[in-house]
């Protein structure tokens, strides 16, 4: 009897690096690095591939389908928020890149973290990104979103994000809020792995 191939989990983080993120820079660095440790531990029992993109008015795809242990940690030097927010370009470019190596049995889990609104994209618009995210969800993949509380309803409606995949931080985040949101993402990912 032929055994079913076990799904790989592909995790993509699309992380805002625009100027407004400077006020939560330290917490973003610490929360991301802790998430990297979580993914590394997770990879001992599951086939996890991790990808990272950052964006301001430019999009940087730092890693694609790497073992979590191979990804670099964020530091004060390599995560320096500045400039504007090309969110739609970041989502469109990053998703198109990840789709190139997505196999039929893979489960894709995408997290977008932004503290602001789109204001600088040149290549993708809201409609194009919406088409991409809807197609992914229709194919059984998961998209989670972390944003400011005031923007939560906007992004939830624009990209049809489910309630249990929508996480928010306050306008002036208290210590631990970013860390808590990353923790919620990790718990959601664990649920998907448990059902995989």
Image: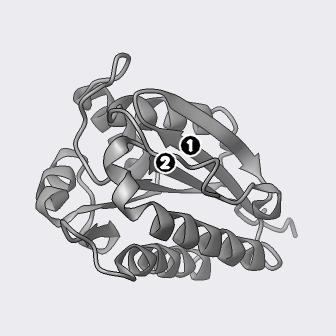
* Residue 14, disc: 2
**Marker disc for residue 53:** 1
Quote the CA–CA distance across marks 1 and 2.
5 Å
Q: Nearer the viewer, residue 77 or 184?
A: 77
Question: Relative to residue 104, is residue 129 drawn left or right?
Answer: left
Other residues around mark 1 within 10 Å, as few (<14) / some (14–19) / many (≥20): many
Residue 153's disc is none
How packed mark 2 is, by other alpha carbons closer than 10 Å (few <14, some 14-19, many 20 or more), is many
Front-most of residues 112 and 193? 112
Q: Identify the secondary structure beneath mark 2.
A: strand
Task: Classify residue 106 as left or right of residue 134.
Answer: right
Q: In front: 150, or 29?
A: 29
Name the quadrant of the C terminus.
Answer: bottom right
- Residue furthest to the top in view is 122
Q: Residue at x 30, y 25 (%)?
A: 120
Q: In this figure, which colouring scheme has been used for the structure? A: one colour
Dot 1: what SS? strand
Residue 66 placement (x, y as % from top left): 77, 51
- At horizontal 36% and vertical 81% (from top left) the residue drawn is 175
């Amino acid at each position: 009897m032929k055994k079913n191939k076990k799904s790989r989990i592909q995790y993509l983080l699309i992380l805002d690096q625009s100027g407004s993120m400077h006020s939560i820079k330290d917490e973003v660095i610490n929360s991301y690095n802790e998430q990297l440790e979580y993914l590394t531990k997770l990879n001992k029992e599951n086939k996890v591939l991790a990808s990272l993109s950052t964006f301001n008015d430019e999009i940087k795809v730092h890693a694609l389908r790497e073992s979590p242990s191979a990804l670099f940690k964020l530091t004060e030097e390599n995560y320096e928020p500045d400039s504007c927010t090309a969110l739609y370009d970041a989502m469109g470019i990053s998703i198109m890149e990840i789709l190139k190596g997505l196999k039929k049995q893979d489960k894709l889990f995408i997290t977008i973290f932004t503290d602001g609104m789109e204001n600088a994209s040149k290549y993708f618009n809201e409609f194009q990104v919406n088409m991409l995210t809807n197609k992914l969800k229709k194919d059984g993949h998961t998209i989670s979103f972390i944003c400011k509380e005031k923007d939560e309803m906007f992004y939830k409606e624009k990209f049809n994000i489910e309630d249990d995949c929508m996480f928010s931080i306050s306008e002036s985040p208290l210590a631990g809020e970013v860390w808590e949101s990353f923790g919620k993402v990790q718990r959601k990912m664990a649920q998907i792995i448990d059902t995989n």
